[in-house]
């Protein structure tokens, strides 16, 4: 019985690792692209919103 329990544990562990790796590879591919585009969108928005510095003659 102990041998079967050991095999079962190893199998379940292996399947967990495989699913983790698969999920991670799929996720890292898709989400990194999404994150990059999202970050660039935020950067573009921030750049667009920046006020132009007032000319020095305005302060005098």
Image: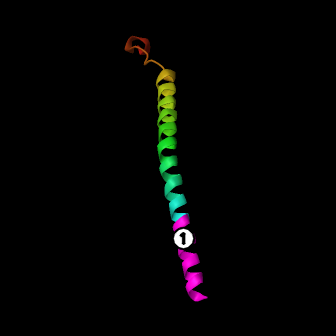
Q: Nearer the viewer, residue 42 or 49?
A: 42
Vertical comparison of 9 with 15: above or below: below
Quarter containing the C terminus: top left
Left or right of residue 47, residue 3 in this image: right
Q: How would you rate the neighbour count of disc 1 (Cα within 10 Å): few for under 14, some for 14-19, many for 20 or more?
A: few
Q: Is residue 50 above or below residue 40?
A: above
Relative to the observer, which residue lies in front, 9 or 51?
Answer: 9
Q: Secondary structure at mark 1?
A: helix
Q: Residue at position x 55%, y 79% from top? A: 7
Measuring 52% from the left and 42% from the top, which residue is drawn there? 31
Q: Position of residue 37 (x, y in %)?
A: 49, 33
Residue 19 in picture, x, y percent from top left: 54, 59
The magenta stretch is 1-15
Image location of residue 13, percent across then percent down: 54, 70
Residue lying at the far bottom of the rendered structure: 1
| 58 left or right, relative to 45 | left
Residue 7 on the magenta segment: yes
């Amino acid at each position: 019985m102990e041998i079967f329990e050991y095999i079962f544990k190893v199998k379940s562990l292996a399947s967990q690792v495989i699913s983790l790796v698969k999920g991670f590879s799929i996720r890292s591919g898709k989400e990194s692209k999404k994150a990059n585009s999202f970050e660039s969108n935020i950067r573009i928005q921030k750049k667009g919103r920046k006020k132009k510095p007032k000319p020095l003659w305005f302060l005098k």
